[in-house]
Image: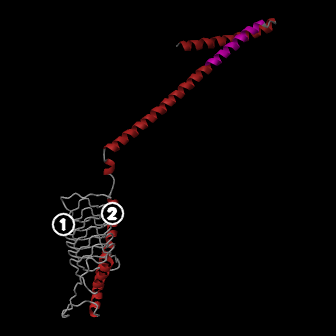
Amino acid sequence: MSEKRSDHWLDTVEGLSLVGAVLGTGAGFAFQQITYVAAPVTLALVMNFVNRQRHQDRMQQQTIARIAESRLAVERQVELQVQDLREETLSNTATPMAMASFDIAPLETQVQALQANVERPMAAVSSLEGQMKDLAAQIAAIAAQSGRHLVDANGSNGATEILPLPGDGAAGDRANQFWQQYESGVRSFVGIDLAGVDLTEPEIYLDGIDFSEANLEDAVLTAMNLGEATLARSNLRGVKLDNANLAHADLTEAKLVDANLRGANLRGANLERADLQNADLAYADLTHAKLQGAKLDNANFYRTRQVGTEMPTAVAIAQRV
């Protein structure tokens, strides 16, 4: 209220000074005295300057006030948006609504398609195994007809017999004698002693071979084809069977302590009551394998395939690298 009165008083004085300047100008012309003009004009100029300064100050104050109001409005709007975002984030974190609305059906379809693609090569491998078995049988028949197989003393029934391998002979000599007997048609090597012998021949399929109760401790059988072989109760401690094919092999009660079975194909293999302590089965395929009653203490099952595998129920399996 006082500011309005001051403005009114200043405007009044400025108006009166202007009127006085006009009257003084007329009186100056009438009486030829410049004094009548000087005082009113000076007063009018002073009041005009005062009013202009006052208006400028007011405009500056109004501008500052508007800037402050605009800044406050922007800050409030930003604060409200941040608060809304924070509440939305907390709501999404506290409730599983986002996950509940996520459709995993396409992912399940992709997983099923991937599993089907993985099974196709395995089916092809099984078919190839059957063909190789038939081929091995034909080769054995040809060898029998050509007289390359060993005949027993009377030669009446054409059955093959196992020639004893020297237990204390050099590993290379025992390996050569084994392959000679195998090529002659011998398939039963029950109780044979091949400890420390290197039999690595990946291209040869040991179809239906019987190594029951054999001593193959520390033997090297890397990448060997031993599909459907019989190794029941055999000593395979420290044996190297990495990347070997042991599909549907009989390893019942076999001693496989410290054995290297890394990447081996053990699909459908029978490992019931086998001793696999400290064995390395990383990346091995144990699909539908039987491990009931097996000893698996500290065995390495890192990234093994265990679809339909019959695992022991009372033994903890260490998933070590």
- Residue beneath disc 1: 273
Report x, y in % for residue 50.
65, 15
Secondary-structure class at tag 1: loop
Tell me where the magenta segment starts and ends, as one range: 35-54
| Residue nearer the viewer, 316 or 163 | 163
**Distance of mark 2 from mark 1, alpha carbons?**
34 Å
Judged by its main secondary structure, the magenta piece is helix
Quarter of the rendering occupied by the C terminus: bottom left
- Image coordinates of residue 32 in percent, x first then y, are 82, 6
Image location (x, y in percent) of residue 258? 27, 64
Q: Residue at x 34, y 69 (%)?
A: 117
- Disc 2 secondary structure class: helix
- What kind of residue is marked 1? Arg
Residue 28 falls in image quadrant: top right
Q: Earlier in the sequence, mark 2 or mark 1?
A: 2
Q: Which residue is mark 2?
A: 111
The answer to whether residue 126 is above or below residue 22 is: below
Q: Amino acid at mark 2?
A: Val
- The residue at 70%/10% (across/down) is 43
Q: Residue furthest front?
A: 168
Magenta span contains residue 148: no
Q: Is residue 313 left or right of residue 206?
A: left
Q: Is residue 252 visible?
A: yes
